[in-house]
Structure formats: structure tokens, C-alpha cells
Amino acid sequence: TVGAPPAVIALETDVTTPPGVAAQVGLSAVLLAGAALLIASFFRLSREETGFRTDHIWTGGIPLPPARYPDDLARAQFSERFRTELQNTPGIEAVALIDALPLSARLTQAPYTRADREQPPISQRPGGTLQTVSPGFLRLLGIPLLAGRDFDEHDTPDRPLVLLISHSAAK
């Protein structure tokens, strides 16, 4: 049959009986409780201390075409020119560059080991997050330097590499 009677017959099945209604109400309550917990967790997480300054910070991304910037030196030269131009722009107090924002999903993992110990095969080395930053990055984001020195203008691709590690990686 066509029309309203089949729809009415369909509505008169288990969905409108007390067990069906109770199941729907129960499922709705579980979904609402889950949504409330998710929202509460989001608000707690948004107030969590990140370990770096986030106020008055502007971020942006610039993809460098591999054909024009084929190697580390070309990318480093562009980055330094860009950083200098930004630093000389009126109204900008400080500039630092990084290859991926902290807490972003674009982080690079790399195996590492201490130079003063026996070198295990690469497959057995622990992995750590690797980020390339410019001089002034720690100061700009208010990240304290616990020991050693910060990067400076003398740390260039043609010089020996410099490494900063987190407190937890040092342990």
C-alpha cells in the first residue's frame, strides 16, 4: 500500500513501545554525557600551560619550491633574508623562524644517540622530535635555556651543527 497507512504501521512497531523509547532515551543520555565530557576536557586542555608564550605571536607558513630552493644552503639564505626583512619592518618587535610550529602534527622524528657512548645501530636508537629554528626562537617564545648557549648568527649551514635538547631528552 501507498501513502500514510504504511508509515503509521511502521511507527506502531517497537520504536513506540516503552522498551524502544527507554533505549532511545538511554542512548541519548549516554551521547549527551559523552559530549559534555569532551567539551569539559577541551576547556581544561585549552587552559593547560604549554611551556611557551603564545600571546602577541603571529605565525605563517611559506612553502619553498624545491626547484628554486634545492638544498639546505639555498633555503637557509632565503630564511635569513626573510627574517632580516621582517625584523626591519616597523611594528615588529622580534622575529624567529621554525620549520613546524610547536604542538603541531608536522613534526619530524629522527633517531639520536650520545656521541660519548657506544653507537647502537640506527634501528635501535630512540627517536626524538627534530625542529629547525632560527636564532632568537627561545627568547621570542619565552622558553628558558637551562644550560649551554642559544643559537646565534654564527650558526650557519657551513659551520658545525649546533643542537639544543629539551630537559626530558637530556635525562
Image (cartoon, rainbow, N blue to C red):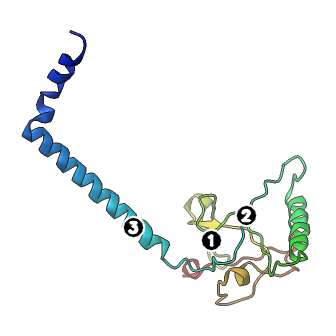
Residue ID for mark 2? 99
Where the C terminus falls, by quadrant?
Answer: bottom right
- On residue 167, the disc is none
Residue 38 in the figure: left or right of residue 113: left
Q: Secondary structure at mark 2?
A: loop
Q: Secondary structure at mark 1?
A: loop
Where the N terminus falls, by quadrant?
Answer: top left
Q: Residue at x 70, y 74 (%)?
A: 57
Closer to the camera, 66 or 24? 24
Residue 48 in the figure: left or right of residue 33: right
Cα gap from disc 3 to disc 2, whole angstroms: 29 Å
Q: Residue at x 66, y 84 (%)?
A: 142
Amino acid carrying mark 3 in the image: Ser
Q: Are marks 1 and 2 in contact (CB under 8 Å)?
A: no
N-terminal label among 3 and 2: 3
Residue ID for mark 3? 41
Amino acid carrying mark 2 in the image: Asp
Which percent across, then down, holds residue 17?
9, 36
Which percent across, then down, holds residue 4?
22, 18
Residue ID for mark 1? 113
